[in-house]
Image: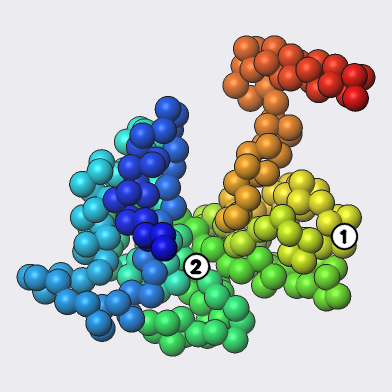
């Protein structure tokens, strides 16, 4: 049997890393938890969540000096939770959006309502972005991606980022438009659809894509490292 990692243990992994590692924790099922767990002093799940982040130094608005030292986004499918904690922390928040037939767990609002321009204009006061299921941004038919919806463009009009979920490398989760190639799919979503970030179960693949597409972003030293890496790869190929 394996134990379940705690929130604080998860945070310690990021803080103990030799470089800056951001976190993206979710306020998961707050309605369910608040109905079944009671904390002293009348505190809620959301209060304990924010207290833990503050305990380990997480603070600051998006791209502020404080935030860049310990980057964090807070995500939730429950808009009332994000609104509630907005009075407790300025850590950037992202409103997750479920499938078209699933209402919000706390306010029972429909997909059509929470993706309307009126609602986006409302929620932007509390969050920096939205996190929709990717198949609702670009519908899928017969494992082929169809024409993208206008949600990304409309969210950007309201100064909201878009972080769709969840990208995976297994063949059944990739699409035939891109020869079942996750790197081509990343390119499509980032450079064609125009998303600002994304959730993936294969962070190594996304990191590799970023290195390949922005090889000189860290300066001349990284350029030399890249050339050395390419030379090493060619050498291995010649001797294969």
Q: Which mark is residue 177?
A: 1
Residue 24, position in %: x, y?
A: 44, 52
Q: Is residue 69 above or below residue 121?
A: above
Under tag 1, what secondary structure? helix
List x then y, in percent, for residue 63: 42, 39
Task: Give the farthest residue toward the left.
Answer: 41
Residue 226 x/y as whole percent: 72, 19
Position of residue 41 in the picture relative to residue 146 (left or right): left
The residue that mark 2 highlights is 96
In this view, the residue in front, 40 or 109, is 40
Neighbor class of circle 1 (other Cα within 10 Å; few <14, some 14-19, many 20+) is: some
Tell me which colouring the rendered structure shows: rainbow
The C terminus, quarter of image: top right
- Looking at marks 2 and 1 on the same chain, the residue that comes earlier in the sequence is marked by 2
**Residue 108 visible to the viewer:** yes
**Residue at 63% over, 50% down:** 202
Residue 112 seen: no
Q: Residue at x 85, y 68 (%)?
A: 144
């Amino acid at each position: 049997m394996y134990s379940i990692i705690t929130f604080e243990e998860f945070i310690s992994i990021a803080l103990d890393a030799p470089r800056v590692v951001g976190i993206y924790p979710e306020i998961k099922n707050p309605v369910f938890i608040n109905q079944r767990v009671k904390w002293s002093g009348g505190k809620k799940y959301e209060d304990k969540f924010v207290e833990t982040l503050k305990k380990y130094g997480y603070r600051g608005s998006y791209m502020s000096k404080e935030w860049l030292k310990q980057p964090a986004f807070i995500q939730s499918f429950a808009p009332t939770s994000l609104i509630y904690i907005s009075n407790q922390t300025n850590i950037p928040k992202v409103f997750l959006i479920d499938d078209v037939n699933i209402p919000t767990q706390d306010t029972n609002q429909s997909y059509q309502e929470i993706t309307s321009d009126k609602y986006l204009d409302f929620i932007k006061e509390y969050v920096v972005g939205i996190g929709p299921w990717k198949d609702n941004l670009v519908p899928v038919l017969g494992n082929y991606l169809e024409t993208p919806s206008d949600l990304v463009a409309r969210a950007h009009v309201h100064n909201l980022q878009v972080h769709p979920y969840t990208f995976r490398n297994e063949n059944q989760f990739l699409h035939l438009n891109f020869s079942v190639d996750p790197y081509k799919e990343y390119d499509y979503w980032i450079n064609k659809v125009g998303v600002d970030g994304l959730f993936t179960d294969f962070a190594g693949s996304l990191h590799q894509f970023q290195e390949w597409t922005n090889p000189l972003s860290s300066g001349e030293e990284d350029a030399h490292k890249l050339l050395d890496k390419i030379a090493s790869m060619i050498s291995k190929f010649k001797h294969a």
